[in-house]
Image (cartoon, helix red, strand yellow):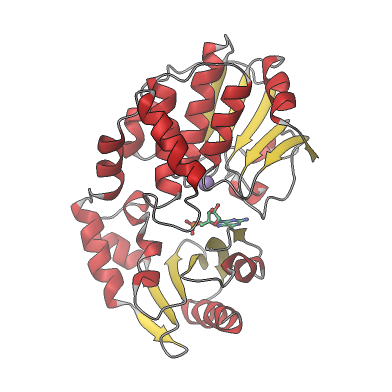
């Protein structure tokens, strides 16, 4: 992947049309915010463009997705946002894995699968890089773009609470509010609103909590049975991965979710300076130093043991 400047990135996008913007599977606020902010901006520049995702975008992001009219076209230029690895394209988008023209991302573990790219691991959210790309293209930021960028920054920094929230994160968020973003509405919806199913899955998840290595590791285990019993969807479990790390004395918080065919999705969160991205890389995953994930296959017991051992070795 050839690293490009913001000027070059703007030029590439100005010269492109019929642009498909790929977001990662299980899309989060930063993926959706980055994808839709860039799409809105490129529409303003007269482009045909559509953000796409292998999975359905959770309904709570409707205030972002509903503002962009659907366009159908034969894609000519492929851009990815917030997408570290072709593993995260998902079934519907995997066809583009060797065809990505431009990658805009903030994951240090980005595998460099694209032709051109801007990867800034210092950016708290990919949306912060998108904002700079839009500025470099000389496109003005309207309310729709501002809401999308604000959402990306706010969600990826855990409402400005994580270590990745930098002065730039706060400054850009403030600028987005000046451009019309509804910060109160967005933060209330993202952080102070939970579905009843979410509360039910939290109740069950907490019952599964175990401690290891003198309480330095805490593990939550979510089975398919628990999902069924609570009526929760995958959207409802977003953010649960942050819970084990909130416990006093926990250095690495782990959430394991049972998926189909003996696959388990593992989310790791570091409370201090331990690098969980390196732990997840041992299982072919990745992410950020303080928040990473991987998929591990086996029986529930095997997966739990392997993952706890690997995390324990990182203490
Ligand atoms: P989560 O635990 O919320 O699924 O993911 C935390 C972070 O790790 C996100 O930034 C996500 O992009 C990254 N991540 C999660 N799973 C994987 C994976 O399987 N591979 C890679 N490379 N990154 C992942
Ligand atoms: Mn992100």
**Residue at coordinates 53% horizontally, 76% vertically from top-left?**
303
Task: Estimate the x, y position of residue 159 in percent, counting from the top left.
Answer: 36, 49
Please state which of residues 160 and 306 is positioned toward the viewer in this rendering.
Answer: 160
**Is residue 11 placed above or below 225 in the rendered structure?**
above
Quadrant location of the N terminus in the rendered image: top right
Residue at image coords 37%, 52%: 234
Picture coordinates of residue 187, whole percent (x, y): 30, 42
Residues 122 and 90: in front is 122
Vertical side of 185 occupied by 267: above or below: below
> Could you tell whether 59 is left or right of 45 in the image?
left
Residue 308 on image: x %, y %: 52, 81
Foreground residue among 22 and 242:
242
- Farthest bottom residue? 214
Outermost residue to the left: 196
Quarter where residue 307 is shown: bottom right
Quadrant assignment, res 56: top left
The answer to whether 120 appears left or right of 224 in the picture is: right
Q: Is residue 53 visible?
A: yes
Q: Is residue 56 visible?
A: no
């Amino acid at each position: 992947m050839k690293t490009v400047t913001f000027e070059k990135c703007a030029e590439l996008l100005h010269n492109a049309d019929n642009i498909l913007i790929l977001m990662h599977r299980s899309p989060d606020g930063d993926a959706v915010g980055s994808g839709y902010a860039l799409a809105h901006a490129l529409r303003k520049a007269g482009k045909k463009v559509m953000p796409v995702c292998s999975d359905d975008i959770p309904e709570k992001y409707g205030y972002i997705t509903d503002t962009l009219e659907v366009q159908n076209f034969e894609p000519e230029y492929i851009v990815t946002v917030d997408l570290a690895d072709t593993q995260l394209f998902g079934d519907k988008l995997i066809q583009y894995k060797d065809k990505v023209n431009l990658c805009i991302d903030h994951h240090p573990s980005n595998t460099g699968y694209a032709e051109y790219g801007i990867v800034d691991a210092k950016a708290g959210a990919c949306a912060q890089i998108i904002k700079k790309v839009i500025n470099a293209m000389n496109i003005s930021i309207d309310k729709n773009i501002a809401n999308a960028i604000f959402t990306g920054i706010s969600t990826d920094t855990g409402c400005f609470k994580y270590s990745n929230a930098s002065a730039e994160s706060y400054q850009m968020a403030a600028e987005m509010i000046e451009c019309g973003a509804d910060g109160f509405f967005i933060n209330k919806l993202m952080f102070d609103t939970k579905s009843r199913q979410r509360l039910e899955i939290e109740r069950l998840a907490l019952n599964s909590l175990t401690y290891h290595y003198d309480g330095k590791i805490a593990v939550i285990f979510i089975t398919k049975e628990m999902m069924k019993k609570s009526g929760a969807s995958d959207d409802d479990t977003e953010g649960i991965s942050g819970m084990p790390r909130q416990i006093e004395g926990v250095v690495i918080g782990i959430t394991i979710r049972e998926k189909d065919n003996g696959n388990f999705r593992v989310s790791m969160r570091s409370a201090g300076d331990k690098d969980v991205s390196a732990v997840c890389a041992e299982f072919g995953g990745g992410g950020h130093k303080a928040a990473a994930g991987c998929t591990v296959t086996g029986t529930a017991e095997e997966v739990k043991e392997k993952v706890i051992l690997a995390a324990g070795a990182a203490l």
